[in-house]
Amino acid sequence: MHGADQPLEPDPVIEAYKRDVDRTLLRENLRRSVEERIEALMQLQAFADELRRAGQRLRA
Amino acid sequence: MTDFKAAVRALADVGVEFILVGGVAATVHGSARLTGDIDVVYRRSNENIHRLVTALSVHHPYLRGAPPGLPFRWDEATIQRGLNFTLTTDIGDFDVLGEIVSGGSYETLLPNTVTISLYGVECRCVTLDTLIRVKRAAGRPKDLEAVAELEALLEERRRLEGR
């Protein structure tokens, strides 16, 4: 891999997006174990699926 | 919904050499973003391709988004002829990648990985720095927000480590 040891130049678009990142969520995740992070992802997926199904029922 | 536990176990149980990349790797490092599939880079040796076929065959892999009924066979010849496969399976969506942009092959990525313990198995995950480089290099507009979060994570981690 090229440039793996070199620091990345700040990208103005990424820096702009960074201002809107909710760091409280990140700090909470960093306190969790890796397995807890994956479990939280699966719960979020299940919730997203449920919302999708609710939307479909509404349109039916 | 992808069963990440079953996915990781399916690969590890038969000894597939793989590296977690993409959204799940971001989750491993603390990302709060939703991802629907599991992306892995696999070693393209004959033995490993055989193991990969064995691991996923029981979960009925099929090309994601392709019309039903195509003569797709999940076997060693198919993997040897191709490189990257976006699959749907009984346990969720799998992106099985021989190479990734700016990250290269399994062998190229390997020095830029960490070993993690997940559901009782040890597996390799790309480092946060490398994930950022790979996503930046991909240059897709949808990745820019994800990269912003990953860079914020890197800053938070360094803050915690007192650097």
Image: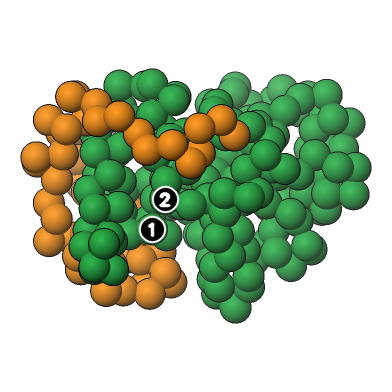
Chain colours: A orange, B green
Q: Amino acid at mark 2?
A: Leu
Residue sitting at the far left: A19
Q: Identify the secondary structure beneath mark 1.
A: loop
- Quadrant of the image occupied by residue B144: top left
Q: Amino acid at mark 1?
A: His
Q: Classify residue B153 as left or right of residue A18.
A: right
Q: Is residue A2 above or below residue B159?
A: above
Distance, label 1 to label 2, CA atoms, is 7 Å
Q: Classify residue A31 as left or right of residue B124.
A: left
Q: Nearer the viewer, residue B27 or B87?
A: B27
Q: Position of residue B47 (x, y in %)?
A: 90, 49
Q: Nearer the viewer, residue B95 or B69?
A: B95
Visible in this render: residue B58?
no
The mark found on residue B128 in the picture is 2
Identified at 70% across, 64% down, the residue is: B12
The mark found on residue A44 in the picture is none
Q: Classify residue B116 as left or right of residue A54.
A: right
Residue sitting at the far bottom: B120
